[in-house]
Image (tube, coloured by chain):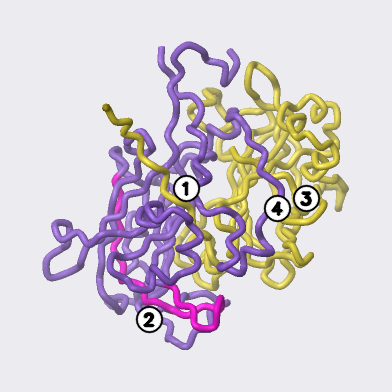
Amino acid sequence: MQKLNYLKETPSQTAGPYVHIGLAPGAAGFDAYDRELGQDIAGPHAKGERIRVEGVVIDGTGSPIKDVLLETWQANAQGVFAHPEDGRPVEDGFRGWGRVITDFDTGEWGFETVKPGPSRARNGKIAAPHISLWIVARGINIGLNTRLYFEDEAEANKQDDVLNLIEWERRRTTLIARRSLRDGMPVYRFDIQLQGENETVFFDI
Amino acid sequence: MKKPAEFYQRDRRWHPPALTPDYKTSVARSPQFALISLENSPSEITGPVFGHGDIDPTDNDLVYNYAQGDQCAIGERIILHGRVVDENGNGVPATLVEIWQANAGGRYRHKKDTYLAPIDPNFGGCGRTLTDEDGYYYFRTVKPGAYPWRNWINSWRPAHIHLSIFGSGFAQRLITQCYFEGDPLIGQCAIVKSIPDPDARKQLIALMDLNATVPLDAIAYRFDIVLRGRRSTLFENRLEGN
């Protein structure tokens, strides 16, 4: 009999409590690199609405997780990903990727970016504006994937194939960030619950 | 024409599940509802692109990248090297590999680590590099020490190096840990054993690689990394829907 010679993906292990040493050494308490990566998601030239996103990741006891690290991935305001397979140009300095750590005392995290535009989905359809999130921490054995959608995109959200794939309508609301204004800047609140009846929807992507 | 399409679905039985009660911290941090399985869209097949402008060439040398003057880190000098490939066996070029670790005494340079082993003033504990066109990477560092952690009261982590790897799409994002051949703590560790399949655990054990050692300088360990592979479109091309 012949053999299929596919390899197996390297298994995941938790990022552990000291993930900052590797991915955000400034937060661990020392300067190892001239440039830490993921600090500037949109760059200075990106078009579109400048926004701030804030939240906290909450564990099954209802407590904030203070050692969590998130990564963000998004399209620009025109719905273009800064990646060769998108094939369209983005603004100089727009990367669309960010790395976000928490306040070690409160677990609060936040980042600034531009609001993404509608992007390409499967089968010629359009995805509602969203930011993909990847969450790692001590006690999380394999990174958690979720998506942040925007409260003020209700019409687009209704048409979004990913949101509509979630059978339970009340669970869809766990992916909708709430908008407010602070000093004229839109701030979206997006708390992530790891357990409980309001557990955030996580995806196997 | 063949074009790269979706990534192969992740084999969740090969990875650790979210809830692994022997690793106590996972109990309150594991989602309880089933993950919703998504077909890949451009949001998942794209991901951040890094270049040589993002890092310094010396970032992969942990023996010297935080040392003062002409000093160097204390400990057994090692080379950690290997290839990043996908499940099809193809090298993953120009992808960012970041590592972090404890020093030779098992102490992390982190404001939250209070283990009684001392900080090494010449060791930071982080490194990063981009794979070359074949997916190859290498670091020079010191072998990390084992250290105690609060799981059970007498729990010790085997010597390990944490690795973060990107690949070309956000769906390939991976963090893992590399262990060292022959360490008796590997079989005792609740984090290692969060991986159910013994063969999958073995995939995280680096082998001593005498051919790659630098004589009179550093012992090499080989650690190859496999990221998710991609299908090729054969008949249809509906992913982007053109």
Residue drawn where x is 26% and y is 62% of the image: B79
Residue denoted by label 1: B14
Q: Position of residue B138 (x, y in %)?
A: 29, 54
Direction from residue B188 to residue A68 in the image, left or right: right
- SS category of the residue bearing label 2: loop
Specify the quadrant of the image occupied by residue A147: top right
Q: CA distance from mark 4 to mark 2?
A: 37 Å
Specify the quadrant of the image occupied by residue A172: top right
Image colour assigned to chain A: yellow
Residue denoted by label 3: A190
Q: Are marks 2 and 1 on the same chain?
A: yes
- Which chain hosts label 4? B
Residue denoted by label 2: B105
Query: Mark 4 Cα within 10 Å, few/some/many (few <14, many 20+)?
Result: some
Quarter of the picture containing the C terminus of chain B is: top right
Sequence-wise, which precedes: disc 1 or disc 4?
A: 1
- SS category of the residue bearing label 4: loop
The label nearer to you, 2 versus 1, is: 1
The label nearer to you, 4 versus 3, is: 4
Q: Nearer the viewer, residue B131 or B197?
A: B197
Quarter of the picture containing the N terminus of chain B is: top left
Q: What label does residue B32 carry, if any?
A: 4
Up-down: is B145 above or below A80? below
Amino acid type of disc 2?
Gly
Amino acid type of disc 3?
Phe
Amino acid type of disc 4?
Gln
- Which chain hosts label 3? A
Image colour assigned to chain B: purple
Q: Are marks 2 and 3 in contact (CB under 8 Å)?
A: no
Direction from residue A19 to residue A79 in the image, left or right: right
The label nearer to you, 4 versus 2, is: 4
